[in-house]
Structure formats: structure tokens, C-alpha cells
Image (cartoon, rainbow, N blue to C red):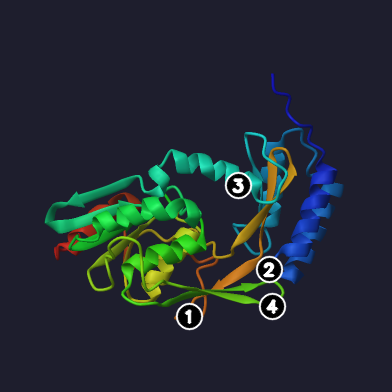
Amino acid sequence: MTIAAKVLPASIIDETARLVTEHYVFPETAEQLAELLRRRLDDGAYDVDSAEALAGLVTTDLQSLNGDRHLRLKHHAEPVPAEQGAATLASIRRDFDTSLGGAPRVELLDGGVAVVEMAPMLFPLDWAAEPLGAALTLAARAQALIVDLRANRGGDPDTVAFVCSHLLDKRTHLNTMYWRDGERSEQSWSQPHVPGTRFGGSKPLYVLTSGTTFSAAEELAYDLQQLGRAVVVGERTRGGAHPCQGWTVHPHLEATVPVGRAVNPVSGTNWEGTGVEPDEPCAAADALERARRLALGRPAG
């Protein structure tokens, strides 16, 4: 029998507040959040016995000032390792192994229109390059391509650049990450060469989104939209543009803290809090048929 680890709210809140103060990309907000957590602890707001219940309460408070959906205390049903980032890595590895490496569907529709679904995540590039490269190569000869991100909850910015590299003709600046210290930045570019065959930058491209499309999946949709390369079809996305890191603060709890902010070179901003607005708005359930009709040159209705 597995005995659940005891929940000690004071130590968990103290460590979470410390991590937010030291690492959150917006230092002034970090100080306010740490103060809020400690005040709520003193008020007895976190006097619960369940790690899952504590995660929900703390996450609500962490997101209460600026709505940053990457800032959270995340509950894991299975015990997670103590090493930084290991909790998330263990969780997503299970998803990778059960989703054909993040490309669960490749299909050719009538009229030479291909669909590549990327879900549930854009996994770390050293895992995902082979399955995503194979899926995109298989679809490369299609007359039009639909990339389905409706069930994608985020992932690796390097994998975003890898996918974009298959959908553009030349090396292109996609995004810039600015880190908390204000002195470092990191540019993301598509690559001039890809393994396999490139779909390229001229044939019709559609990206499907939903209200649950999040984080790196939003970046993929946003980057291609801002470059004028893709038509985004579906629902407005969730609105999380800040890359984050995770720290285990309890055997079942991980504090995820955004450590940077994204700036698109075309728009000069990002999708944080607003989501990616579709070019062709419709219910997520109708987005595939809407994109298919657009690709075939038929009325969207």
C-alpha cells in the first residue's frame, strides 16, 4: 500500500514563495505574490489535508494578480522526483510514448489536402524530431496542409522552430525570449535545412486551434500567422506566452514559474493573456471542415 506524503502547507508555501520571488520573470509582481501567499497562509486559507486541494487554492492565488496561466502549483497523481524539471519530464514521457511521439494522426483528405495532428504536446526536440519529421515529410507532397493543434497543450520552443522549418522556404526569425535579468535574450529561428522533404512556404497552410490550445502550440500558430504563412482556423487560444521551469516542492506538487517572456519580431508583442485570435473563427469541432473547404476553394459556411 502506498502512503500519501503528508501535506505541510507552511513549508510548501514558504518554498513556493521563495521560488516565485527568485525566478518569476516580473520581479515586482513576484514580491506581491509572495506576500499574498504568506498572508493567505497566516489566514488559514491553506489549511487542507490534500495535496490536490492545496494545489488548486495556491494556483488560484498565484494567477490572481496578472492571470499568468503558467504560474501554478501543479498536482501530480504519481510521486515525482525531486530534481528540477523532473516532475514534468516524467509526466510528458508517458504522453510521448502513447501518442506516436506527438503525431497521432496523418491523413490525406479528398483534393490532396493533408492533415497532421500534433498532440498532446510539442515534445522535447530530441524526442520529437524523428516522429514529427516523418509526419511532415509524409504530408510534404500534399497540395495543402492542415496542422491540427486543437488538443495541444504546449511544449518545447525548439520543436516549434523545427516544425516551422518544414513550412517555410528560408531561415526566418520566429521569436525572441527575454529572460528575467533583462540582460539576456535568445532568438528562435527556423532552419534552412530539414531532415526529409519540406512542405515549403508557398502551398496553402491552415492551423486549427481551440480554447485549450496553449503555450508552445500557441507560439506555433502565432508565429505562422504573424509571418502571413498560415490561416488560423477555430477558437481563440488560452493565452500563455511565458516559458517556465518547474521545481518539486512536495512528492506530489510542482511549482511552475515563468522565467522569460516572448516577443514576436513582426507584432512586437505576444499572445499572453489574449490568446491567438483566429483568422477564421468557428467552433473547434467545426474547424477541420472549415479549413478543408477553404483549402478546396469552397465557401467556408
Instruction: Indicate the position of residue 43 as horizontal and vertical percent values.
Output: 85, 47
- Identify the residue at horizontal 70%, vertical 56% (top origin): 62
In the drawing, does residue 106 fall left or right of residue 74? left
Compute the Cα span from label 4 to label 2: 9 Å
In primary-sequence order, the first of circles 3 and 1 is 3
Of the residues shown, which amino acid type is indicated by label 4?
Gly
Name the residue that disc number 3 marks: 88
Find residue 25 and name its label. 2
Compute the Cα span from label 1 to label 4: 17 Å
Compute the Cα span from label 3 to label 1: 29 Å
Q: Is residue 119 visible?
A: yes
Compute the Cα span from label 4 to label 3: 26 Å
Instruction: Indicate the position of residue 105 as horizontal and vertical percent values.
Output: 31, 46
Instruction: Indicate the position of residue 292 as horizontal and vertical percent values.
Output: 21, 57
Of the residues shown, which amino acid type is indicated by label 3?
Thr
Of the residues shown, which amino acid type is indicated by label 1?
Pro
- Identify the residue at horizontal 32%, vertical 67% (top origin): 167
Q: Nearer the viewer, mark 4 or mark 2?
A: 4
Corner quadrant of residue 50:
top right
Name the residue that disc number 1 marks: 265
User: Few, some or many C-alpha atoms within 10 Å of disc 2 (few <14, some 14-19, many ≥20)?
Assistant: many
Of the residues shown, which amino acid type is indicated by label 2?
Val
Find residue 215 and name its label. none
Find residue 182 and name its label. 4
Q: Is residue 44 visible?
A: no
Compute the Cα span from label 3 to label 2: 20 Å
- Identify the residue at horizontal 35%, vertical 44% (top origin): 104
In primary-sequence order, the first of circles 1 and 2 is 2
